[in-house]
Image (cartoon, rainbow, N blue to C red):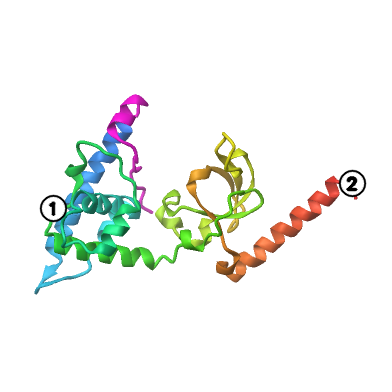
Amino acid sequence: MTEYKELYPYSRQYAVSCHEIAYWRDSYRENCDCARAIERAIEGNYHDNRLENGTRGIIERYGFDRVNWVLSNTIQEKDHDGRFSPENKAWAKQTYIPEDEVRWHFCVESHPGLTNLFVDQVRRAWQMLGLFDQSQCTGEKDYEGKLLVLKPSMLKDEYKSPDYQLFYAEGGFGCSPNARGRKVFGFFLKDGDRTNYNRADFLGVIDEAYLPDWAREKLAEVTEQGECESITMGGK
């Protein structure tokens, strides 16, 4: 199982102010290394006027999060270039990458048309994971006692599946959209493992219409157990 270097999602200036420059530097170097590896993959897989799929080795080496980060950064930095498709430009804008004077260092400098094809291949690999997205959430703001969807970036690659995105919120100030606290406490519906996340780590409350059968049954068990405990505590 590959252990990927942690992706640092903040700017160098922020890292300096928080005494986290070492984390920023490690992530920056890995970003640059990833960009160069993508360039080599594109060059090595371009034959007879077509780009063969060379994404697997890159994703296995760097993980989806960093590969998506580097490619999104590349398209954002080259947004004026018409050889990147409108769909890929819209995709890239979904990732917030902080302004930094060295962002261009980890741009992929291969031919833009070929880079665009590589992005298509990475996005297809991502779609094959079948992950939940914002469109499958209800828009409810109160999270307590609700089944939430974790953002894929919060999960390691080996856990990037819709099953592990489902998190039951038991409580915490972060359950309320107006509270100052951000923590949401609960457990993974898949295996019952308890932990906590920040409110911003979730896409929202899952629309039950999208729940697989196993999750619907498990949620019913959790809800029934909660009602029984409430009755017991009430002395009835």
Task: Let me know if residue 141 is in the magenta part.
Answer: no
Is 67 left or right of 116, judged from the image as shown? right
Count of numbered labels shown in the rendering: 2
Q: Is mark 2 on a helix, strand or loop?
A: loop
Q: Which amino acid does label 2 sit on?
A: Gly
Farthest residue in the bottom direction?
Answer: 48
In the rendered image, residue 54, in percent from the top left (x then y), is placed at 22, 64
In the rendered image, residue 82, in percent from the top left (x then y), is placed at 16, 61
Near mark 2 (Cα within 10 A), the count class, few <14, some 14-19 or many ≥20, is few
Q: What residue type is labelled 1?
A: Glu
**Residue to which mark 2 is pinned:** 235
Residue 218 seen anywhere in this rendered image of the structure: yes
Residue 56 seen anywhere in this rendered image of the structure: no
**Residues shaded magenta:** 1-21
Taking the spot 79% from the left edge, 50% from the top edge, the residue there is: 229
Task: Let me know if residue 11 is in the magenta part.
Answer: yes
> Which numbered marker is on residue 109?
1
Q: In this view, does 4 lie above or below 191?
A: above
Q: Give the mark nearer the N terminus: 1 vs 2.
A: 1
Taking the spot 18% from the left edge, 49% from the top edge, the residue there is: 107
Q: Is residue 160 above or below residue 52?
A: above
Q: In this view, does 171 lie above or below 71?
A: above
Near mark 1 (Cα within 10 A), the count class, few <14, some 14-19 or many ≥20, is some
